[in-house]
Amino acid sequence: MDKLSDIIKIRARPKLKEPNLFAAWPGISNVAMIVATYIARKLEFKELASVRAPFFFDPIGVMVRNSIVEEPQFPQSRFFYWKNPRGKDLVLFIGEAQPNTNGYSLANCIIDAAEHFNVKRVYTCAAAISRIHHTEEPRVLGVGTNPSIVEELANYCDVNASNLQISGMNGILLGVAMERNMEGACLLGEVPTYTTRMQNPIAALGVARVLSKLLGVNIDFTELKLAATATSEGMKQVAAEAMGEYIDYFTEPIWERDEDDSEYDG
């Protein structure tokens, strides 16, 4: 791979104090991105660096405006930093999209940058698809790159995740961190199986609360709580539709017959 300066454009050189890295990409129920963008809004982050997208993404086309072809557009992948007055600083990475084929290379690039910024630990988060009902309090599951981290996570969330797979970049980055001997942890918020296509600030709220404790950061979650409440109402409708489809599927053969079958000889 090319040297880091060819791939990462450094925009600031702050003196960071034992920073942690929290990285997020879009995923199931958008849990990771809800957490990342909410934290970004609530804390005064400053731009730190950006990834040169053509190394990892291929454009799928170009826009044309007034018959003029525009330059190819790429998803942004950027680093930000926040200096914590009461503890360890925080580096935030937000990727607007996940690469189709170069995820492992991108993950290694991000860990290269993390080492450059003297990051001590990497955090990601994701959704954990579960057979819970939307009225149940979703758990936050925690996994780590070594037993000592799992022991620490046990103070804040459920570490009895058994066997699972963390798909996409939110999982790959953690695996690369382990390969590179950097500490890492992933927090997974439970989402009901029938709501995976909708955003889930309920799961995101649980993850964000745990993450804030691990990072030693005080965050006002009032707005996220309101979004979670509104989403729970929407989930009632989704659950009702899912139940209706379930009933229709199993009862249709009973009462729906061909027209000839419903006629009686008289």
Image (cartoon, rainbow, N blue to C red):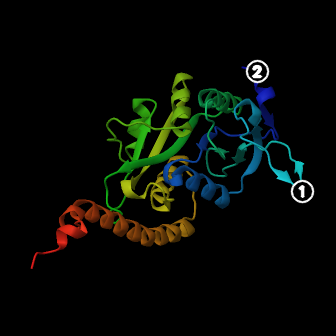
C-alpha separation, residue under disc 1 versus residue under disc 2: 38 Å
Q: Quadrant of the N terminus?
A: top right
Q: Local crowd at mark 2 within 10 Å, few (<14), some, or many (≥20)?
A: few
| Quadrant hosting residue 66 | bottom right
Disc ID at residue 66: 1
Q: Quadrant of the C terminus?
A: bottom left
> Which residue: 70% across, 34% down?
117
Question: Left of 150 or right of it: where is 24?
Answer: right
Look at the picture and state if 40 lies above or below 78: below
**Mark in front: 1 vs 2:** 1
Question: Left of 244 or right of it: where is 41?
Answer: right
Q: Local crowd at mark 1 within 10 Å, few (<14), some, or many (≥20)?
A: few
Q: What is the residue that sits farthest to the front in this orientation?
A: 266
- The residue indicated by pointer 2 is 2
Identify the secondary structure beneath mark 1: loop
Q: Are marks 1 and 2 in contact (CB under 8 Å)?
A: no
> Which residue: 23% across, 60% down?
250
> Which residue: 70% across, 48% down?
83
Front residue of this view, candidates 238 and 265: 265
Amino acid type for the residue under numbered disc 2: Asp
Amino acid type for the residue under numbered disc 1: Asn
Asked if residue 157 can be seen in this view, the reply is no
Identify the secondary structure beneath mark 2: loop
> Which residue: 24% across, 64% down?
252
Asked if residue 50 can be seen in this view, the reply is yes
Q: What is the residue that sits farthest to the left in this orientation?
A: 266
Q: What is the residue that sits farthest to the top in this orientation?
A: 1
